[in-house]
Image (tube, rainbow, N blue to C red):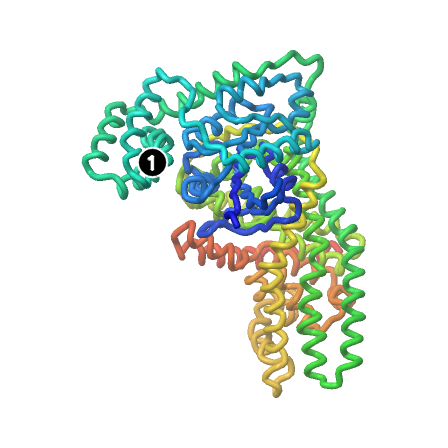
């Protein structure tokens, strides 16, 4: 049996490569993290012709210089793993920028299929791309198509099958600018590197990066080459002090030249939709209100649609608990099965409707290109907090999960910007917090829940802004640089892509947080049951010991304990309350026992206080400081306590 072929999909952010990946693999894919980093890894299987192939959706990168964790992962995979074929996805509406990555792939001399995506948008913009000429220049097959309309994807599958079946080798020569001094220097250094087995395959790429003064490649070469050869290469490079800048400029000039030769842009008889929409979404008067209105709508839809599904699931688990308790005579076993097992599983599964809907709606904002606009709009506001404009990109990632958001701060140039951004991210309400807030708000506030959720969301954002101002005043008081970013065209989202991505978010939740929440609910059950001599078990000791601290906020023992388990995973707040209250369903118990004042105070505290343990670990790793971590934890608890206490007083006066 022949070994399975590995296909790597490479492309720049917003090129639509994930849509191509979903088309090729369907639901036969797994989502995880790359070893050693919290960068999402998508891998799937597909049957193409007579072969089953393994397809890797590599992180989106602008180039192959590892300035970010995504770029480091992508380049490392291409260099160190067995790659039989590369599918390079290009944005047909931004060929000059897309070709910058394609040109660097040429120097790797791997078999490549160039898939120019977004053909539907290309036609609408009256752009013509001469694919045959581009194929001649790049020396590989070029296909024009669209992941959204699935145009050209069958041709892509056939070409993949042909190249794998024929074991097509990459072209040995790079047919670009033979007479250029940089190209000649690359060939000279490559001829030296070809003498070593470890560097022979990628000799041209290594040469390019050595001239570019790539530190990682330089370290690789030091471990492989003898001193005399290494000194000879360094002598060639050091003779030109500006070689690294010249290489980047040269690569851009090539992509610019190729784009100019194969791309023809016709005149438009209308104002593009993107420009019309940006006049509204980027308006100084409407940008922020629209952003807030969209999130209010997300909360409204998540609460109302998810609530109906949640009610059905709660009814199922309630009836299951009644059935078990009616057929099991032992009280301990009955309690263990109904409270520990069914309650633990139920607390996980009842969150799924809210998680799915929220991720689905947030993915719509991402796929349409709106999220990039928010980063642009918020740039000037970030400067008021002493932060780099680029800081808003990791901050906005915090709405999904704080862990990758903290890691994304690596892209910021200075340590001061990185530290201040990392300390700000935990105050952004992540999807886990929002999901718990939505579920509990429905029980506490009923039909008014969306407005209360939105209020909590706004208060959380205000605490993030307040914290940013405080951090900017006391830590690293430096002037931040502006933000330069490309705004992608608005695109209609692909329903299949939205559903597949949301499905895998749920799968990831069940594998990671779901498992942890289930085990925490089991532990809480035993801790609440034993020792038998004490009503409420060991957990009752802990709760009563800490409860006097939280009694001014109106929290009972169960609320206090749930905040502790919430440090491990915010969703475990639900399972802890379910077990400790012995409530089936939990929402029914809360609606009859919690006052609106206590519920609002509790939810506000949960929105502000310490992040989950995974975020805490990453903050320690990224800041390299226990001082920053414990300082942030102490600050967030004190801030949560103070604001919640004040809000409780105001709530009591107003309502």
Q: Residue at x 80, y 60 (%)?
A: 312
- On the image, the x and y values in percent for residue 158 come to 62, 33
Q: Residue at x 62, y 37 (%)?
A: 20
Q: Is residue 319 left or right of residue 640?
A: right
* Occupied quadrant, residue 327: bottom right
Q: Is residue 387 left or right of residue 333?
A: left
* Occupied quadrant, residue 51: top right
- On the image, the x and y values in percent for residue 281 come to 67, 29
**Secondary structure beneath disc 1?**
helix
From this viewpoint, which residue is outermost toward the left?
Answer: 228
| Residue 84 visible (yes or no) | yes
**If the image is split into quadrants, where does the C terminus sit?**
bottom right
| Residue 382 visible (yes or no) | no
Residue 315 sits above or below residue 474 on the image = below
Residue 507 sits above or below residue 142 on the image = below
* Occupied quadrant, residue 87: top right
């Amino acid at each position: 049996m022949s070994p399975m072929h590995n296909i790597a999909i490479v492309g720049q952010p917003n090129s639509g490569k994930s849509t191509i990946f979903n088309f090729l693999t369907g639901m036969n894919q797994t989502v995880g993290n790359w070893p050693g980093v919290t960068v999402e890894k998508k891998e799937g299987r597909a049957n193409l012709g007579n072969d089953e192939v393994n397809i890797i959706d590599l992180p989106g990168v602008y180039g192959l210089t590892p300035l970010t964790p995504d770029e480091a992962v992508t380049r490392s995979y291409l260099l160190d793993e067995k790659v039989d074929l590369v599918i390079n996805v290009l944005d047909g509406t931004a060929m000059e920028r897309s070709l910058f990555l394609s040109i660097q792939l040429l120097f790797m001399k791997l078999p490549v299929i160039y898939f120019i995506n977004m053909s539907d948008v290309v036609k609408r913009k009256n752009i013509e791309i001469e694919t045959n000429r581009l194929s001649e220049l790049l020396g590989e097959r070029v296909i024009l198509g669209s992941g959204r309309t699935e145009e050209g994807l069958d041709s892509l599958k056939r070409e993949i099958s042909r190249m794998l079946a024929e074991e097509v080798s990459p072209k040995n020569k790079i047919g670009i600018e033979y007479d250029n001094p940089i190209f000649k220097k690359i060939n000279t250094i490559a001829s030296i590197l070809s003498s070593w087995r470890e560097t022979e395959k990628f000799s041209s790429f290594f040469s390019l990066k050595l001239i570019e003064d790539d530190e990682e490649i330089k370290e690789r070469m030091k471990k492989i080459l003898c001193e005399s050869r290494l000194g000879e290469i360094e002598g060639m490079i050091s003779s030109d002090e500006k070689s690294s800048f010249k290489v980047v400029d040269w690569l851009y000039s090539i992509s610019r030249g190729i784009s100019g030769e194969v791309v023809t842009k016709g005149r438009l008889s209308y104002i593009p939709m993107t420009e019309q929409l940006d006049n509204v979404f980027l308006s100084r008067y409407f940008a922020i209100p629209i952003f807030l209105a969209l999130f209010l709508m997300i909360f409204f839809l998540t609460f109302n649609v998810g609530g109906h599904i949640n009610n059905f699931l709660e009814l199922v688990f309630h009836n299951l608990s009644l059935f078990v308790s009616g057929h099991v005579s032992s009280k301990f076993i009955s309690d263990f099965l109904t409270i520990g097992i069914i309650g633990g599983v139920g607390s996980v599964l009842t969150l799924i409707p809210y998680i799915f809907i929220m991720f689905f709606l947030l993915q719509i904002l991402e796929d349409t290109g709106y999220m990039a606009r928010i980063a642009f709009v918020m740039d000037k506001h970030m400067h008021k907090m002493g932060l780099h404009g680029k800081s808003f990109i990791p901050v906005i990632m915090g709405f999904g999960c704080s862990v990758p958001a903290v890691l994304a701060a690596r892209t910021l140039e200075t340590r001061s910007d990185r530290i201040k951004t990392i300390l700000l991210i935990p105050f952004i309400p992540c999807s886990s917090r929002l999901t718990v807030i939505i579920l509990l708000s429905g029980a506490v506030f009923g039909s008014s829940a969306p407005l209360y959720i939105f209020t909590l969301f706004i208060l959380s954002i205000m605490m993030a802004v307040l914290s940013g101002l405080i951090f900017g005043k006391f830590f690293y008081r430096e002037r931040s640089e502006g933000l330069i970013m490309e705004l992608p065209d608005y695109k209609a989202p692909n329903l299949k892509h939205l559903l597949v991505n949301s499905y895998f978010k749920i799968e990831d939740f069940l594998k990671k947080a779901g498992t942890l929440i289930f085990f925490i609910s089991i532990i809480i059950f035993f801790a609440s049951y034993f020792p038998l001599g004490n009503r409420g078990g060991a957990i009752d000791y802990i709760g009563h010991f800490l409860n006097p601290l939280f009694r001014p906020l109106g929290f009972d023992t169960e609320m206090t304990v749930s905040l502790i388990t919430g440090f491990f995973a915010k969703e475990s707040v639900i399972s802890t309350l379910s077990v400790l209250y012995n409530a089936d369903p939990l929402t029914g118990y809360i609606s009859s026992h919690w006052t609106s004042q206590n519920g609002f105070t509790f939810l506000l505290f949960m929105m502000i206080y310490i992040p989950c343990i995974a975020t805490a670990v990453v903050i320690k790793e990224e800041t390299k400081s226990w001082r920053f971590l414990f300082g942030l934890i102490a600050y967030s608890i004190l801030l949560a306590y103070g604001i919640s206490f004040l809000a409780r007083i105001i709530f009591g006066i107003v309502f």
